[in-house]
Amino acid sequence: MKKMAAGAFKKNYLAVMDEVQAKHEAVVITKHGKPVAKLVPISTGTDEIYNFLGGRGAAVGDVVSPVISPEECSAPTTSINFLRLGE
């Protein structure tokens, strides 16, 4: 893997991108000798994250109806007594 200073990358970024595409080799971009970014070639297939859980789950039961009844959703009907100081 090739390393390149950010200043050099800034001057030659189009050529670096062409090189990464042609050689299929990543380039690490550094600032003051510390890595800050990596330029990697893109594959022509699908992304690794796309559909990575495909076929591993299943919808079971009724997925349209509410989980609890409307009565269970309503606000509590108990009254709240407020304490009034000084009365």
Image (cartoon, rainbow, N blue to C red):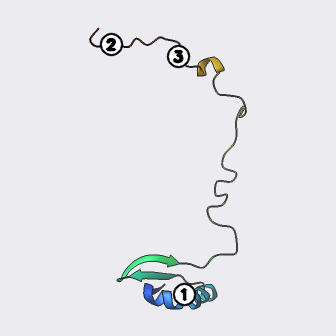
Query: As displayed, is residue 44 above or below residue 16?
Result: above
Give the alpha-carbon distance from disc 2 to disc 1, as whole Å. Answer: 71 Å
User: Which residue is denoted by mark 2 in the rendering?
Assistant: 84
The mark found on residue 13 in the picture is 1
Mark positioned earlier in the residue sequence (2 or 1): 1
**Which of these two is toward me, 75 or 72?**
75
Q: Residues within 10 Å of mark 2 (few under 14, many from 20)?
A: few
* Residue type, label 2: Arg
Give the alpha-carbon distance from disc 2 to disc 3, as whole Å. Answer: 22 Å
Q: Is 17 situated left or right of 33 in this image?
A: right
Q: Residues within 10 Å of mark 1 (few under 14, many from 20)?
A: few
Q: Nearer the viewer, mark 2 or mark 3?
A: 2
User: Which residue is denoted by mark 3 in the rendering?
Assistant: 76
Residue ID at (45%, 82%)? 29
**Which of these two is toward me, 14 or 68?**
14
Q: Is 7 situated left or right of 85 in this image?
A: right
Q: Is 9 situated left or right of 54 in this image?
A: left
Q: Residues within 10 Å of mark 3 (few under 14, many from 20)?
A: few
